[in-house]
Image: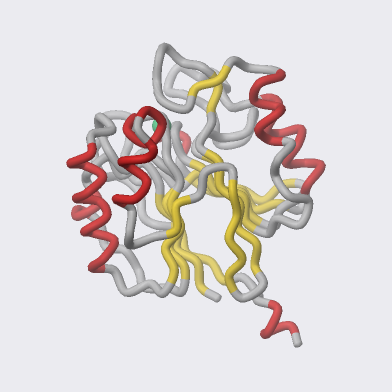
Amino acid sequence: MRIVAISDTHTKHNQFDIPDGDVLIHAGDFTSRGKQKEIRRFNNFLGTLPHKHKVVIAGNHDFALENEPELAEPMLTNCTYLRDSSIVIEGVKIYGSPWQPEFFNWAFNLPRGEPLKEKWEQIPDDTDILITHGPPYGILDKTARGEHVGCEELIKIVLKKKPAYHIFGHIHEAAGEIKQDGIHFINASLLNLQYKPAFAPTVFDIQTQTEVI
Ligand SMILES: [Zn+2]
């Protein structure tokens, strides 16, 4: 099953060549200011893509999904929206969560420590692909100022639960991928620090249960 991972498109989704695949994953921040209009446009764009499955989580810019979920969530008709929830596609369990450590007053912010830990404890043990908006501490989370700003609680839980893949975004300038401790980490940001298109979607293949048999 071919997965195409993207993140942090901030309304500029039209400016990229998005390769075909079975599952498109967007790890949050598809809007710039979290307006309903931006969500509608993003959803229309998703409708034009050929991928059989599209899985989306929110990021810290996607305010309407935190502030008025009853209005905003039903607008995402062309994808599966995950918020501390999972979907199983051909036996592959994908879990998504939008939360990140507090930084000023953005959407889906939580204080570091216990409140985030409680969210990460909900990640099922048998998750194959984990999607979070923010990176785990120490992994593709270095800002332009050289600070690691990922979540300390998230890296602890991820190393315990060992998903095959962990996809995130948020820290644009740290885009890239790395394999460590048996986990394939992908910071799938497509824009750079200046919000200019700079990186390409990440494509990988994951074995499904039917393929194993
Ligand atoms: Zn973000």
Choose top left, top right, bottom left or bottom right for residue 139: top right
**Residue 17 or 74: which is nearer the viewer?**
74
Q: Is residue 163 left or right of residue 171?
A: right
**Above or below — where is 23 with respect to 161?**
below
**Above or below — where is 123 with respect to 202?**
above
Task: State which quarter of the image contains the C terminus.
Answer: bottom right
**Residue 169 or 132: which is nearer the viewer?**
132
Q: Identify the residue at image location x=67%, y=51%.
A: 179
Q: Position of residue 34 (x, y in %)?
A: 28, 33
Q: Position of residue 91 (x, y in %)?
A: 67, 72
**Residue 10 or 174: which is nearer the viewer?**
10
**Residue 81 or 135: which is nearer the viewer?**
81
Q: Identify the residue at image location x=71%, y=27%.
A: 117
Q: Identify the residue at image location x=44%, y=58%.
A: 80
Q: Where is residue 56 in the image (x, y as percent from the top left)?
A: 43, 52
Task: State which quarter of the image contains the N terminus.
Answer: bottom right
**Above or below — where is 29 with respect to 50?**
above
